[in-house]
């Protein structure tokens, strides 16, 4: 089970259908986490996810939720949208081999924190920063 995820570099995989993912993530990490990315929950449901974030940590979500939490965590909401049909057209270009993406830098997975820090610093004004497994 989860062979595909592990082949892509996942060390641990959580089956949200059979366990509480917040509690399981905390168990695997040995406590609360520095950063939690929640792509599923919205609104008040993010309060449960926030429990996995340590004080001073960050909670990131592409869905909206509370602006503030009762703990010292930073919440970042990232809004994403695509015009109708855009994703389909991009998928077609990928399949045809005609989509080119400018890559500014590539980092191995072990250097992911450095890649994130350099990306966030604005060092790369053009192109994508890629983390490989």
Image (cartoon, rainbow, N blue to C red):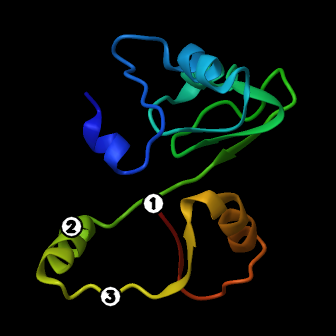
Position of 101 with respect to 63 (left or right) is left
**Is disc 2 surrounded by few (<14), some (14 to 19) or many (20+) residues within 10 Å?**
few
3D distance between C-alphas at marks 1 and 2: 30 Å
Q: Of helix, strand and loop, which one carries label 2?
A: loop
Residue 55, x across and y down, in percent = 85, 29
Vertical position of residue 81 compared to residue 23: above or below: below
- Residue pictured at 59% horizontal, 23% vertical: 28
Q: Of residues 59 and 106, which is closer to you in this image?
A: 106
Q: Nearer the viewer, residue 42 or 72?
A: 72
Q: Which residue is mark 2?
A: 85
Give the residue pinned by disc 1: 133
Residue 16 in the image, given as x and y percentages of width and height: 39, 20
Residue 111: percent from the left, percent from the top? 65, 63
Where is residue 3, by image quadrant? top left
Quadrant for the C terminus in the image = bottom left
Task: Give yes or no for contact between labels 2 and 3 (Cβ–Cβ under 8 Å).
Answer: no
Q: Secondary structure at mark 3?
A: loop
Q: Secondary structure at mark 1?
A: loop
Question: Label 1 to label 3, Cα distance in Å?
Answer: 21 Å
At a point 26% along the width and 66% down the height, the residue shown is 87
What residue does disc 3 label?
A: 100
Answer with mark 1 or mark 2, whichever residue precedes in sequence. 2
Q: Nearer the viewer, mark 1 or mark 3?
A: 1
Residue 29 in the image: above or below residue 116: above
Residue under the point 65% across and 26% down: 29
């Amino acid at each position: 089970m989860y062979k595909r995820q592990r082949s892509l570099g996942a060390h641990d995989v959580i089956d949200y259908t059979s366990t509480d993912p917040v509690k399981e993530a905390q168990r695997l990490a040995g406590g609360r986490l520095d950063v939690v990315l929640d792509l599923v929950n919205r609104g008040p449901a993010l309060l449960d996810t926030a429990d996995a974030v340590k004080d001073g940590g960050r909670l990131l979500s592409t869905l909206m939720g509370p602006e503030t939490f009762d703990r010292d965590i930073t919440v970042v909401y990232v809004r994403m949208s695509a015009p109708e049909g855009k994703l389909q057209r991009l998928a077609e270009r990928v399949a045809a081999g005609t989509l080119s993406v400018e890559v500014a830098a590539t980092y191995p997975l072990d250097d992911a924190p450095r890649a994130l820090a350099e990306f966030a610093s604005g060092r790369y004004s053009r192109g994508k920063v890629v983390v490989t497994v």
